[in-house]
Image (cartoon, grey):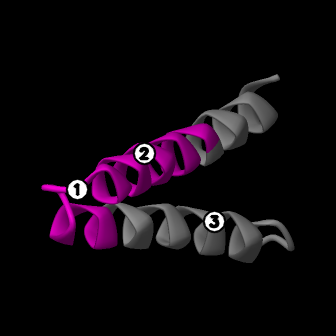
Amino acid sequence: MGPHTNTMLIIIVTGVALMLIGFGFRDRNLGMTLMGLGLVTAIGAIIYKAYITFY
């Protein structure tokens, strides 16, 4: 595993954790915000990793 793999894994796990916590509070504005923030975090990390890998 590369040195940045652990960092990327932590970022993605944090994003998924935010989505799960937000799903628990989905009937409130805070839950929707957490789900959105988690989604942006996880997908952003994946896109960044793909950008580093292919360019």
Q: Earlier in the sequence, mark 3 or mark 1?
A: 3
Mark identifier at residue 11: 3
Residue at (61%, 33%) from the top-left corner? Answer: 47
Residue type (three-letter) at the residue carrying disc 3: Ile
Q: Main secondary structure of the magenta part?
A: helix
Residue 31 within the segment the image draws in magenta: yes
Task: In the rendered view, tell whether residue 1 sits above or below residue 28.
Answer: below
The structure residue drawn at horizontal position 30% and vertical position 58%, both measured from the top left corner, is 31
Q: Where is residue 48 in the image (x, y as percent from the top left)?
A: 71, 37
Q: Nearer the viewer, mark 3 or mark 2?
A: 2
From the image, tell me which residue sits under label 2. 39
Residue 55, picture quadrant: top right
* The furthest residue to the top: 55
Label 3 with label 1: CB-CB less than 8 Å: no
Mark 3: few/some/many CA within 10 Å (<14, 14-19, 20+): some
Q: Percent position (x, y) of residue 10?
A: 63, 75
Q: Where is residue 11 in the image (x, y as percent from the top left)?
A: 63, 65
Q: Which one is closest to the eye, mark 3 or mark 1?
A: 1
**In this rendering, is residue 34 above or below 21?**
above
Q: Residue 40, image x and y in percent?
A: 52, 40
* Amino acid bearing label 2: Leu
The three-letter amino acid code for the residue at tag 1 is Arg
Image depth: mark 1 or mark 2 in front: 1
